Amino acid sequence: MSAVQQRGSLTQIELAGVTGLSPATVSNIVKELTAAGVLHTAHSTRNGRRALQVTLARGLGLVAGVHFGTRSLRVSLADASMRVLADQRMPLAPDHRADTGLQRAALLVREMLLDVDAAPDELLGVGVGVPAPVDVRTGRIATVGMMRGWDEVDVGGTLSDDLGAPVHVDNDANLGALAEARSGAGAGHDAVAYLRVSHGIGGGIVLGGRIVHGRGGVAGEIGHVTIDENGPICRCGNRGCLETFAGAGVLLAMLSESRGPLTLRDVIDAARAGDPGCRRVLFDAGQHLGVATASLCNLVDPEIVVVGGQLADAGEILLGPMRTVVEQRTMPSVSGPVSVVPSEHGATAEVRGALTLALDRARVGGALGVSA
């Protein structure tokens, strides 16, 4: 059940490979759990051959994922096999208030439950990602001033009271890392580093299937690694952080005099179309990202670095120079340079990680009938 939950859907042959059990044993267990209403099976075709696809049964309940981005809110509803049943994204003001954002999130979750004809008590739990370090023990943001209007807000408790279900909160880049490590570009790797590069820059580290949080929830905050000790003052109060060189606001400001007002999407599209100024800005950003990522690699030695967020849509214009600098600045290894690859889940990585967090907690808590 843990294997099916983590991967969403598997054939019986794939289950045998993942669990190490014989195909005959897997077949017997699947039959028993299907009869008990825990698993659901359906015939499918893989590589021209018929196969029996195994998922968790819908009757086990639902989970919701919520991602508060810097300027947008995304909410998804999924069943216990991680099949997304509903998904909605809406814009937010840059300095949106916590109470307004949480009310909107709760409203969207309730509407989605109605849309799929589910009762409120079918909601097993909710995962929430926010663009700031989080103390996962309390569900509160772990630093002051990173999200104006959110300091000291009990995000988990407020949303839990509104929805009547357990709510678990984490940094959005941590959740992106979890999603990519479980079912994305980092699947099959033990040590995965994830960078979310958008309006802000965040990072997450997954080792042995678990998110690394550190002492107070700030592990992986690569956006606030110093790359120039005499650089500009960052919003965190330090000097020369990566965000002050490669954050979206900085990139757009560099182009505003020659190009006028632009969005990040405008810059990416223009760079892809060959605009030299936009290409240069993204090239330089890739180099700055490479400097900070190389430091991360020398400390953690991940097997793979996954890059997500809107800026990752620039592809090799950004990733090429980033990869070159990482190779230049990391300790040489007989294993070769670390792989730097784009996210497979793209814009849904963080909300998918939130769904995964909610499902993991439901499993540990016994709501799915599976012990930790």
Image (cartoon, rainbow, N blue to C red):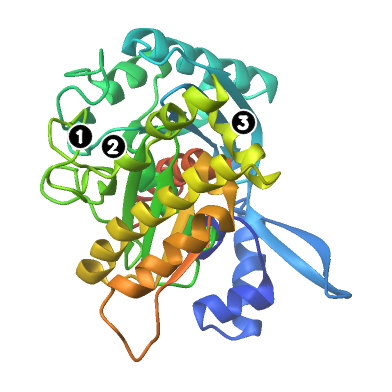
Q: Secondary structure at mark 2?
A: helix
Q: Which residue is mark 1?
A: 232
Q: Marks 2 and 3: CB-CB under 8 Å?
A: no
Task: Name the amino acid type tagged 2.
Answer: Thr
Earlier sequence position, callout 2 versus callout 3: 2
- On residue 266, which mark appears? 3
Q: Marks 2 and 1: CB-CB under 8 Å?
A: yes
* Residue 201 in which image quadrant: top left
Residue lying at the far front of the rendered structure: 258
Q: Which residue is mark 2?
A: 244
Q: CA separation, marks 1 and 3?
A: 25 Å
Task: Name the amino acid type tagged 1.
Answer: Pro
The correct choice, above or below, for 192 with respect to 113 in the image is below
Query: Which residue is at 25% across, 51% downward?
Result: 220
Q: Secondary structure at mark 3?
A: helix
* Residue 199 in which image quadrant: top left
The correct choice, above or below, for 95 with respect to 36 in the image is above
Query: Which residue is at 50% across, 38% downward?
Result: 351
Q: CA separation, marks 2 and 1?
A: 6 Å
Give how far across and how far down residue 114 sits, in percent: 64, 17
Give how far across and how far down residue 348 sits, in percent: 56, 41
Along the line of sight, the residue nearer the viewer: 58 or 189: 189
Label 3 crowd bin: few (<14), some (14–19), many (20+), radius 10 Å? few
* Residue 344 in which image quadrant: bottom right
The correct choice, above or below, for 109 with respect to 312 in the image is above
Q: CA separation, marks 2 and 3?
A: 20 Å
Label 1 crowd bin: few (<14), some (14–19), many (20+), radius 10 Å? some
Earlier sequence position, callout 2 versus callout 1: 1
Q: Judge from the rendering whether residue 170 lies leftward or rightward of residue 122; answer left or right.
A: left
Q: Judge from the rendering whether residue 50 lies leftward or rightward of residue 268; answer left or right.
A: right
